[in-house]
Image: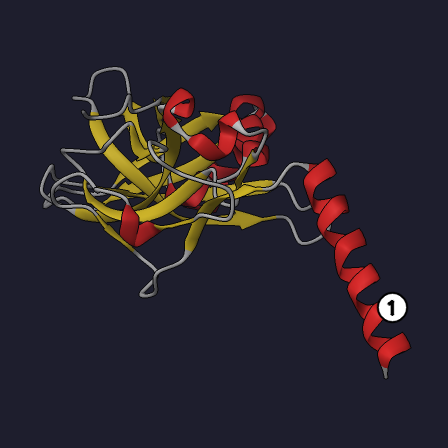
Amino acid sequence: MAGKIPDLNAEVRTGTGKGAARQARREGYVPGIVYGGGTDPLPINLAFNPLLTRLKAGRFLSTLFNLKVPGQDDVRVICRGVQRDVVKDLPTHVDFMRLHRTSRINLFIHVTFENHEAAPGLKRGGTLVVVRPEVELEVTAGDIPDHITVDLTGKVIGDVIHIGDVKLPEGAKPTIDRNFVIANIAAPSGLRASDAEEAGEGEETDAAEG
């Protein structure tokens, strides 16, 4: 059930210190460092444009990457810091930490919904309102779920689906220590308008009787 881990391509950065980092930036790279995992730190360069695209896409600090560096074994890493230019707000340096397959990390996992046809509330014209299209879970780096599944069987209008209602993959647990809402089945707009009208008429009747 492991999800696909995106590749992140980099090159070994020759030389160390501020001079080598400045040279990398002049050549269109963002310097970085990979540390941890019981091995020596590895200075790297990442192409500026692909990195900026990933940063703009969001969730960069909570995404597990498969780091590919020519001449090195692929390694799983997670970003632990992005330094930015204080004026242009563009990346100037990136720190990555190596992870073992048994490492525990926090990642956002996509939520999928199944058995729409078995939900009476949806058959009556109700709407599935997704509050959280993804949830942050603590998972093991070697067994990352591609998604979690919400079964809509038997759900009626007004039902609220909490994280506690969802069977999570073995070893995964929410990072938020409360039973938060994932989705609900809302009444059709016509039914909601009808209910509002009835409530208004009831208030008028009460006022007249009073």
- Location of the N terminus by quadrant is top left
Q: Is residue 157 above or below residue 176?
A: above
On the picture, is 156 further left or further right than 75?
A: right
Q: Residue furthest front?
A: 209
Which residue: 47% across, 37% down? 133
Which residue: 55% across, 29% down? 124
Q: Depth check: 193 or 35 in front?
A: 193
Tell me where residue 33 appears, x and y as whole percent. 34, 41
Q: Amino acid at mark 1?
A: Glu
Tell me where residue 185 appears, x and y as whole percent. 51, 41
Q: Residue furthest bottom?
A: 210
Q: Which residue is mark 1?
A: 204
- Location of the C terminus by quadrant is bottom right
**Does residue 10 appear in this view?**
no
Mark 1 crowd level (few <14, some 14–19, many ≥20, 10 Å Cα): few
Which residue: 75% across, 45% down? 194
Tell me where residue 104 appears, x and y as whole percent. 18, 49
On the picture, is 193 further left or further right than 57?
A: right
Q: Depth check: 116 or 65 in front?
A: 116
